[in-house]
Amino acid sequence: MAGVQLHTDIELVEVSLEAETSEQVIRELGKTVLAKGYIDEEFIENLLAREKEFPTGLETVYPIAIPHVGGHCHTSFLAVAVLKKPVTFMAMEGTGKELKVRCVFLFGITDPQHQVEVLKKFIFAFREEENLKKIHEATEKKEVLTILKTLLDDGLVIDSAVKEAKD
Amino acid sequence: MFKIVVACGGGIFTTTVVTDQVKDILRKAKIQNTITPAKLTEIANISDADLIIVTGKFGTDTKNVANIPIIIGMSLLTGVGAEEFKVELVEKIKEIQAKGAK
Protein backbone atom coordinates (compact mmCIF):
# COMPACT_ATOMS: atom_id res chain seq x y z
CA MET A 1 0.00 0.00 0.00
CA ALA A 2 1.16 3.47 -0.80
CA GLY A 3 1.70 5.55 2.27
CA VAL A 4 2.57 9.16 2.61
CA GLN A 5 5.57 8.39 4.76
CA LEU A 6 8.98 6.91 4.21
CA HIS A 7 9.99 4.02 6.40
CA THR A 8 13.41 3.58 7.83
CA ASP A 9 15.07 1.88 10.78
CA ILE A 10 18.50 1.43 12.27
CA GLU A 11 19.31 -1.42 9.89
CA LEU A 12 18.75 0.81 6.90
CA VAL A 13 21.48 3.15 8.09
CA GLU A 14 25.17 2.62 7.49
CA VAL A 15 27.86 4.79 9.02
CA SER A 16 31.59 4.76 8.35
CA LEU A 17 30.84 2.46 5.44
CA GLU A 18 33.83 1.58 3.31
CA ALA A 19 33.20 1.32 -0.41
CA GLU A 20 35.11 1.96 -3.59
CA THR A 21 32.26 2.65 -5.95
CA SER A 22 28.75 4.02 -5.97
CA GLU A 23 27.53 0.63 -7.16
CA GLN A 24 28.93 -1.04 -4.04
CA VAL A 25 27.10 1.44 -1.83
CA ILE A 26 23.83 0.91 -3.68
CA ARG A 27 24.19 -2.89 -3.53
CA GLU A 28 25.06 -2.80 0.17
CA LEU A 29 22.02 -0.71 1.09
CA GLY A 30 19.84 -2.57 -1.39
CA LYS A 31 20.64 -5.92 0.20
CA THR A 32 19.16 -4.81 3.51
CA VAL A 33 16.11 -3.24 1.88
CA LEU A 34 15.51 -6.43 -0.09
CA ALA A 35 15.77 -8.55 3.06
CA LYS A 36 12.96 -6.48 4.56
CA GLY A 37 10.73 -7.21 1.59
CA TYR A 38 10.33 -3.54 0.72
CA ILE A 39 11.51 -4.15 -2.85
CA ASP A 40 11.82 -6.87 -5.47
CA GLU A 41 15.22 -7.98 -6.67
CA GLU A 42 14.68 -6.11 -9.95
CA PHE A 43 14.69 -2.83 -8.06
CA ILE A 44 18.46 -2.85 -7.54
CA GLU A 45 19.33 -3.74 -11.14
CA ASN A 46 16.89 -1.14 -12.45
CA LEU A 47 18.32 1.40 -10.07
CA LEU A 48 21.89 0.75 -11.20
CA ALA A 49 20.87 0.95 -14.86
CA ARG A 50 19.06 4.19 -14.21
CA GLU A 51 22.03 5.64 -12.37
CA LYS A 52 24.20 5.01 -15.44
CA GLU A 53 21.73 6.66 -17.79
CA PHE A 54 20.35 9.37 -15.52
CA PRO A 55 22.64 9.88 -12.54
CA THR A 56 21.42 11.28 -9.23
CA GLY A 57 24.38 13.18 -7.80
CA LEU A 58 23.30 16.57 -6.46
CA GLU A 59 25.79 19.36 -6.31
CA THR A 60 24.78 20.80 -2.98
CA VAL A 61 27.35 22.44 -0.67
CA TYR A 62 28.39 18.92 0.34
CA PRO A 63 27.49 16.84 -2.71
CA ILE A 64 25.00 14.05 -2.02
CA ALA A 65 23.36 11.35 -4.13
CA ILE A 66 19.71 10.39 -4.14
CA PRO A 67 19.49 7.11 -6.08
CA HIS A 68 15.90 6.06 -6.73
CA VAL A 69 13.88 4.34 -9.41
CA GLY A 70 10.22 3.72 -10.11
CA GLY A 71 8.55 0.32 -9.77
CA HIS A 72 9.26 -2.86 -7.82
CA CYS A 73 8.84 -1.07 -4.52
CA HIS A 74 6.19 -2.17 -2.02
CA THR A 75 6.96 0.02 0.95
CA SER A 76 8.33 3.53 0.64
CA PHE A 77 11.62 3.78 2.40
CA LEU A 78 14.76 5.78 2.96
CA ALA A 79 18.09 4.01 3.43
CA VAL A 80 21.20 6.03 4.19
CA ALA A 81 24.94 5.45 3.98
CA VAL A 82 27.52 7.79 5.43
CA LEU A 83 30.80 6.72 3.87
CA LYS A 84 34.26 6.75 5.31
CA LYS A 85 35.72 7.90 2.01
CA PRO A 86 33.80 9.49 -0.86
CA VAL A 87 32.74 7.55 -3.94
CA THR A 88 32.00 9.03 -7.33
CA PHE A 89 28.48 9.78 -8.45
CA MET A 90 27.82 11.64 -11.66
CA ALA A 91 25.98 14.94 -11.45
CA MET A 92 22.28 14.76 -12.24
CA GLU A 93 22.37 17.59 -14.76
CA GLY A 94 24.34 15.37 -17.07
CA THR A 95 27.33 17.61 -17.57
CA GLY A 96 29.52 14.58 -16.97
CA LYS A 97 30.76 16.18 -13.79
CA GLU A 98 32.00 13.72 -11.16
CA LEU A 99 30.88 14.44 -7.63
CA LYS A 100 32.71 13.07 -4.61
CA VAL A 101 29.87 11.89 -2.44
CA ARG A 102 30.01 10.77 1.17
CA CYS A 103 26.28 10.65 1.93
CA VAL A 104 24.02 8.43 -0.12
CA PHE A 105 20.25 8.51 0.33
CA LEU A 106 18.54 5.57 -1.31
CA PHE A 107 14.83 6.16 -1.82
CA GLY A 108 11.97 3.83 -2.52
CA ILE A 109 8.91 5.72 -3.64
CA THR A 110 5.63 3.93 -4.22
CA ASP A 111 3.55 6.94 -5.16
CA PRO A 112 5.23 10.31 -5.73
CA GLN A 113 1.92 12.19 -5.57
CA HIS A 114 1.40 11.02 -2.02
CA GLN A 115 4.99 11.37 -0.99
CA VAL A 116 5.58 14.84 -2.38
CA GLU A 117 5.58 16.45 1.07
CA VAL A 118 8.36 14.31 2.47
CA LEU A 119 10.41 14.50 -0.73
CA LYS A 120 10.10 18.26 -0.64
CA LYS A 121 11.09 18.35 3.01
CA PHE A 122 14.12 16.26 2.18
CA ILE A 123 15.23 18.47 -0.71
CA PHE A 124 14.76 21.66 1.28
CA ALA A 125 16.51 20.30 4.37
CA PHE A 126 19.55 19.23 2.42
CA ARG A 127 19.94 22.55 0.69
CA GLU A 128 21.09 23.84 4.06
CA GLU A 129 24.78 23.61 4.76
CA GLU A 130 24.21 23.14 8.47
CA ASN A 131 22.07 20.01 7.97
CA LEU A 132 24.48 18.58 5.42
CA LYS A 133 27.35 19.13 7.78
CA LYS A 134 25.59 17.38 10.65
CA ILE A 135 24.82 14.25 8.71
CA HIS A 136 28.30 14.08 7.20
CA GLU A 137 29.81 14.20 10.66
CA ALA A 138 27.55 11.51 12.11
CA THR A 139 29.38 8.46 13.37
CA GLU A 140 26.50 6.62 15.05
CA LYS A 141 23.53 5.08 13.27
CA LYS A 142 21.20 6.42 15.93
CA GLU A 143 22.52 9.90 15.37
CA VAL A 144 21.69 9.67 11.66
CA LEU A 145 18.14 8.59 12.50
CA THR A 146 17.72 11.46 14.94
CA ILE A 147 18.93 13.99 12.38
CA LEU A 148 16.61 12.60 9.70
CA LYS A 149 13.65 12.51 12.04
CA THR A 150 14.21 16.14 13.03
CA LEU A 151 14.40 17.20 9.40
CA LEU A 152 11.66 15.05 7.90
CA ASP A 153 9.39 15.05 10.94
CA ASP A 154 6.17 13.11 10.32
CA GLY A 155 7.30 12.31 6.78
CA LEU A 156 9.56 9.66 8.24
CA VAL A 157 8.61 6.60 10.27
CA ILE A 158 11.35 4.95 12.24
CA ASP A 159 10.40 1.32 12.66
CA SER A 160 11.90 -0.76 15.40
CA ALA A 161 14.23 -3.05 13.54
CA VAL A 162 13.29 -6.66 13.97
CA LYS A 163 16.33 -8.74 14.70
CA GLU A 164 16.41 -11.44 12.14
CA ALA A 165 18.09 -14.81 12.20
CA LYS A 166 21.40 -13.37 11.11
CA ASP A 167 22.79 -12.94 14.63
CA MET B 1 -3.72 28.19 -19.92
CA PHE B 2 0.04 27.82 -19.94
CA LYS B 3 1.14 24.22 -20.42
CA ILE B 4 4.31 23.03 -18.77
CA VAL B 5 6.00 19.65 -18.79
CA VAL B 6 8.45 18.87 -16.00
CA ALA B 7 10.82 16.02 -16.79
CA CYS B 8 13.51 14.10 -14.93
CA GLY B 9 15.21 10.74 -15.32
CA GLY B 10 12.46 8.64 -13.85
CA GLY B 11 9.61 11.13 -13.80
CA ILE B 12 9.14 10.63 -10.07
CA PHE B 13 11.24 12.17 -7.33
CA THR B 14 12.70 15.35 -8.75
CA THR B 15 9.80 15.95 -11.12
CA THR B 16 7.45 15.87 -8.15
CA VAL B 17 9.53 18.26 -6.09
CA VAL B 18 10.14 20.67 -8.96
CA THR B 19 6.49 20.62 -10.06
CA ASP B 20 5.40 21.57 -6.59
CA GLN B 21 7.72 24.56 -6.53
CA VAL B 22 6.82 25.68 -10.05
CA LYS B 23 3.15 25.62 -9.08
CA ASP B 24 3.99 27.86 -6.17
CA ILE B 25 5.98 30.30 -8.29
CA LEU B 26 3.22 30.53 -10.89
CA ARG B 27 0.49 30.98 -8.30
CA LYS B 28 2.35 33.97 -6.93
CA ALA B 29 2.91 35.29 -10.46
CA LYS B 30 -0.80 34.71 -11.19
CA ILE B 31 -0.11 32.59 -14.25
CA GLN B 32 -2.73 29.94 -14.90
CA ASN B 33 -1.08 26.67 -15.75
CA THR B 34 -1.21 22.93 -16.07
CA ILE B 35 1.85 20.85 -15.31
CA THR B 36 2.42 17.34 -16.59
CA PRO B 37 5.22 15.02 -15.41
CA ALA B 38 7.41 13.23 -17.93
CA LYS B 39 10.61 11.28 -18.28
CA LEU B 40 13.64 12.80 -19.96
CA THR B 41 13.50 10.13 -22.64
CA GLU B 42 10.10 11.47 -23.67
CA ILE B 43 10.90 15.14 -24.11
CA ALA B 44 11.93 14.95 -27.76
CA ASN B 45 8.42 13.85 -28.70
CA ILE B 46 6.32 16.16 -26.59
CA SER B 47 4.18 18.35 -28.80
CA ASP B 48 1.46 19.71 -26.55
CA ALA B 49 3.26 22.10 -24.22
CA ASP B 50 4.47 25.68 -24.06
CA LEU B 51 7.55 25.05 -21.98
CA ILE B 52 9.58 22.07 -20.78
CA ILE B 53 11.52 22.19 -17.52
CA VAL B 54 14.12 19.48 -17.08
CA THR B 55 16.00 18.39 -13.98
CA GLY B 56 18.51 16.04 -15.32
CA LYS B 57 20.61 14.92 -18.16
CA PHE B 58 19.49 15.75 -21.66
CA GLY B 59 21.75 16.43 -24.59
CA THR B 60 21.85 20.14 -25.31
CA ASP B 61 21.46 19.03 -28.91
CA THR B 62 18.14 17.43 -27.98
CA LYS B 63 15.60 18.84 -30.35
CA ASN B 64 11.97 18.81 -29.49
CA VAL B 65 9.64 17.92 -32.38
CA ALA B 66 7.58 21.04 -31.79
CA ASN B 67 10.50 23.33 -30.93
CA ILE B 68 9.18 23.82 -27.42
CA PRO B 69 11.69 25.78 -25.32
CA ILE B 70 13.54 23.69 -22.73
CA ILE B 71 14.96 25.15 -19.53
CA ILE B 72 16.96 23.51 -16.76
CA GLY B 73 15.42 23.56 -13.30
CA MET B 74 18.27 22.03 -11.29
CA SER B 75 18.45 25.06 -9.03
CA LEU B 76 15.05 24.19 -7.58
CA LEU B 77 16.69 21.04 -6.24
CA THR B 78 20.05 22.24 -5.04
CA GLY B 79 18.86 25.68 -4.01
CA VAL B 80 21.88 27.19 -5.73
CA GLY B 81 20.51 29.98 -7.89
CA ALA B 82 16.90 29.16 -7.00
CA GLU B 83 15.86 32.78 -6.54
CA GLU B 84 17.31 33.76 -9.90
CA PHE B 85 15.58 30.80 -11.49
CA LYS B 86 12.19 31.92 -10.18
CA VAL B 87 12.59 35.31 -11.85
CA GLU B 88 13.87 33.78 -15.09
CA LEU B 89 11.02 31.30 -15.21
CA VAL B 90 8.34 33.97 -14.93
CA GLU B 91 10.10 36.14 -17.52
CA LYS B 92 10.42 33.22 -19.90
CA ILE B 93 6.75 32.38 -19.55
CA LYS B 94 5.72 35.97 -20.18
CA GLU B 95 7.93 36.04 -23.24
CA ILE B 96 6.33 32.85 -24.59
CA GLN B 97 2.86 34.13 -23.76
CA ALA B 98 3.57 37.34 -25.64
CA LYS B 99 4.29 35.24 -28.72
CA GLY B 100 1.05 33.38 -28.14
CA ALA B 101 0.98 30.32 -25.92
CA LYS B 102 -1.02 27.20 -26.83
Image (tube, rainbow, N blue to C red):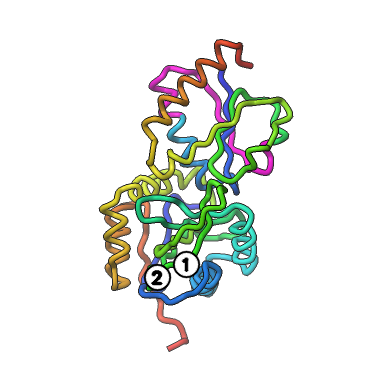
Label 1 chain ID: A
> Is A119 covered by the magenta stretch?
no
Residue A138 % position (x, y): 29, 68
Q: State which region is magenta.
A: B23-43
Q: Which residue, given by chain and number where applicable, does mark 2 sit on? A: A83
Query: Looking at the image, which is closer to me, B52 or B11?
Result: B52
Query: Which residue lies at the image location 56% right of the left edge and 52% below the top edge?
Result: A96
Q: Nearer the viewer, residue A101 or A8?
A: A101
Residue A87 is labelled as: 1
Q: Are marks 2 and 1 in contact (CB under 8 Å)?
A: yes
- At horizontal 59% and vertical 46% (from top left) the residue drawn is B57
Visible in this render: residue A109?
no
Magenta span contains residue B33: yes
| Residue at (49, 55) in percent of width and height | A57
Given the image, what chain letter belongs to the residue carrying mark 2?
Answer: A
Kind of residue at badge 1: Val
The disc label shown at residue A33, or none: none
Label 2 and label 1 in one chain: yes
Left or right: B94, with A123 as reference point = right
Rendered location of residue A43, percent (x, y)? 61, 63
For badge 2, the amino acid type reads Leu
- Separation of marks 2 and 1 at Cα, in angstroms: 8 Å
Q: Nearer the viewer, residue A140 or B60?
A: B60
Rendered position, A16 above or below A91: below
Give the camera-side residue of A153 and A162: A153
Callout 2 secondary element: strand
Q: Which residue is painted at 72% across and 34% down in the image?
A: B45
- Can residue A60 be seen? yes
* Residue A74 in picture, x, y percent from top left: 55, 60
